[in-house]
Amino acid sequence: GAGVSQSPRYKVAKRGQDVALRCDPISGHVSLFWYQQALGQGPEFLTYFQNEAQLDKSGLPSDRFFAERPEGSVSTLKIQRTQQEDSAVYLCASSTPLGGGLETQYFGPGTRLLVL
Amino acid sequence: GDSVTQMEGPVTLSEEAFLTINCTYTATGYPSLFWYVQYPGEGLQLLLKATKADDKGSNKGFEATYRKETTSFHLEKGSVQVSDSAVYFCALSDSNYGGATNKLIFGTGTLLAVQP
């Protein structure tokens, strides 16, 4: 079956522009995560959804970052008034919660955002 | 908070050499441990995992053992190939959701380059 897909794969934005990044998780996966990966670093957690409920947004770096998953499937990460420090790869992952750390998160290819 | 520390790269080896990439962690609970791999131009893929102390994860000739006494999860392979060239990330799952799906905390990644 299809894996996690993300679009666009690349986005160049001028400082101050708003951007929207899309994630299509694996069909039927209840859990959806967003991570931010700066150049040369490991991914860092941004936010987590279980179905349409956003259960954890503790990793969002500022109130310019907003994520939604209105129907419990596709998710959108929106960044308002982009800044140069927002330049990174944004990764989406989905999984089925099994508890006890047994679940596997499946990652999409990422969206590489460059803010000029 | 929980964290992962892994050896810095790049690690450069000749084909058929033995590989070790060190990973240690700090956690307040009992996390699951993971190794993810990122091949050039591709997304993150789960390589192997271990969910409790003394478990050994293995896949594609790679192995790692969950050592609670040394808080380590070192990645090993007996004979590397050119096709193993990639960035390897050690990660732990942070139990924040009452045993349900957990966010991942990653190390900074180790670049492995295998020369023919």
Image (cartoon, coloured by chain):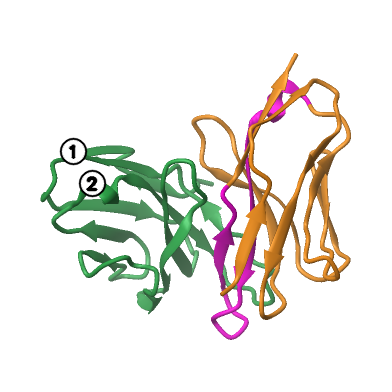
Chain colours: A green, B orange
Instruction: Give percent across and percent down for residue B45.
Output: 60, 45
Q: Which chain is mark 1 on?
A: A
Q: In this orientation, does residue B24 appear?
A: yes
Instruction: Give percent across and percent down for residue B44.
Output: 55, 45
Q: Say which residue label 2 marks.
A: A84
Residue type (three-letter) at the residue carrying disc 1: Leu
Q: In this orientation, does residue A26 appear?
A: no
Q: Quadrant of the C terminus of chain A?
A: top left
Residue type (three-letter) at the residue carrying disc 2: Gln
Instruction: Give percent across and percent down for residue B87.
Output: 61, 38
What residue span does the magenta drawing correspond to?
Answer: B81-108
Callout 1 crowding tier (Cα within 10 Å): few <14, some 14–19, many ≥20: few
In this picture, residue B90 sits left or right of residue A108:
right
Is label 2 in a helix, a strand or a loop?
helix
Q: Name the residue rendered at 38%, 53% in the picture.
A: A24
Q: Say which residue label 1 marks.
A: A116
Q: Quadrant of residue A8?
A: top left
Q: Name the residue rendered at 65%, 77% in the picture.
A: A99
